[in-house]
Amino acid sequence: MSDTLLKALAGVTLAAMAVAVAAYLRLGLAREIAIAAVRAVVQLAAVGAAIALIFEVEPLAFLFLAVMVLVAGATAGSRLRGLPHARACALLAIALPALGVTGLLVAVGAFDATPRAAVPTAGILIGGAMAAATLSGRRMVEALTDEAAAIEAKLCLGDDGRTALAPVVRRALRTGLIPAIDQTRSVGLVTLPGTFVGLILGGASAEQAAATQLVVLLALLAVELGAGIVITELIQRAVIRPGERVVMV
């Protein structure tokens, strides 16, 4: 039995065990776990084939990144119910920081300007931006409803829309950055990040793996803050109307 098949079987077995335990405990999650596992198998197989093709036909890397950003935007946007043009807002919040920082890292030579280096880096940053945009965006959208009375009171006292929303924006940004901050603070002590482990398994030295992981983690902090700033700015633009009225979504 090949090493690849053995790993796949081990993963499927563990997923089946998780489904069985969830069903036994009546958590109502057995179906969701099974669907997630099947999707992971199908998607990773497709991505593996796509990346192998990209390594052969390098211009396809741009198409692959475009698909990643579009899917990330649609996923994050679906979590921002009630926000006008939510998917477009999420797409912009993800694409600007993630692709911008990827381009910067390639430009300064931190990563090679090849699909083999740039695509995985961009993928990690796009994933981080998606998480931050989702968390910050949801926190702000929820606050517009939960704290509507407080916001209206500030407006009645003479605050403009942005001043009234400033505390909501700050809390939303903090919420979006907590996972990235915790991950960075605990790296090597609580977790071994995927980039580090992947490079070690691929034969890189511990020093090379650590240096690369450090760049990725610190880039993620910047990207996720950028995603949070963009999504909260877009939400403010959507809800603040002429006359400094704030429309709750």
Image (cartoon, grey):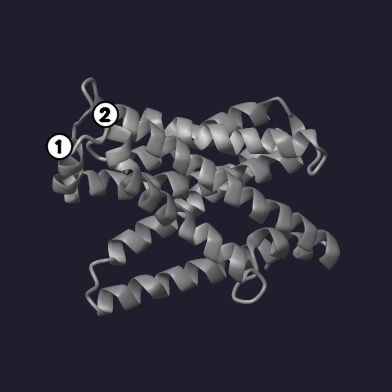
> Looking at the image, is 110 positioned above or below residue 184?
above
Location of residue 53 in the rendering, given as x and y in whole percent from the top left corner: 69, 35
Q: CA distance from mark 2 to mark 1?
A: 14 Å
The quadrant of the rendering that contains the N terminus is: bottom right
Q: Which mark is residue 240?
A: 2
Residue sitting at x 37%, y 50%? 172
Q: Which of the 4 image quadrants contains residue 79?
A: top left
The amino acid type, in three-letter code, at marker 1 is Cys
Residue nearer the viewer, 92 or 118: 92
Residue nearer the viewer, 196 or 2: 196
At label 2, counting other C-alpha atoms closer than 10 Å, the crowd grade (few under 14, some 14-19, many 20 or more) is some
Location of residue 51 in the rendering, given as x and y in whole percent from the top left corner: 66, 40
Q: Earlier in the sequence, mark 2 or mark 1?
A: 1
Across the whole image, how many numbered discs are drawn on residues? 2
Q: From this viewpoint, is residue 131 visible?
A: yes
Residue sitting at x 26%, y 79%? 24
Front: mark 2 or 1: 1
Q: Which mark is residue 156?
A: 1
Residue sitting at x 62%, y 63%? 5
Q: Which of the 4 image quadrants contains residue 161?
A: top left
Location of residue 179 in the rendering, given as x and y in whole percent from the top left corner: 49, 60
The amino acid type, in three-letter code, at marker 2 is Ile
Q: From this viewpoint, is residue 71 visible?
A: no
User: Is residue 21 toward the left or the right of residue 193 in the image?
Assistant: left
Helix, strand or loop status at disc 2: strand
User: Is residue 177 toward the left or the right of residue 216 in the image?
Assistant: left
At label 1, counting other C-alpha atoms closer than 10 Å, the crowd grade (few under 14, some 14-19, many 20 or more) is few
Name of the residue lying farthest toward the front: 157
> Looking at the image, is 240 positioned above or below residue 182?
above
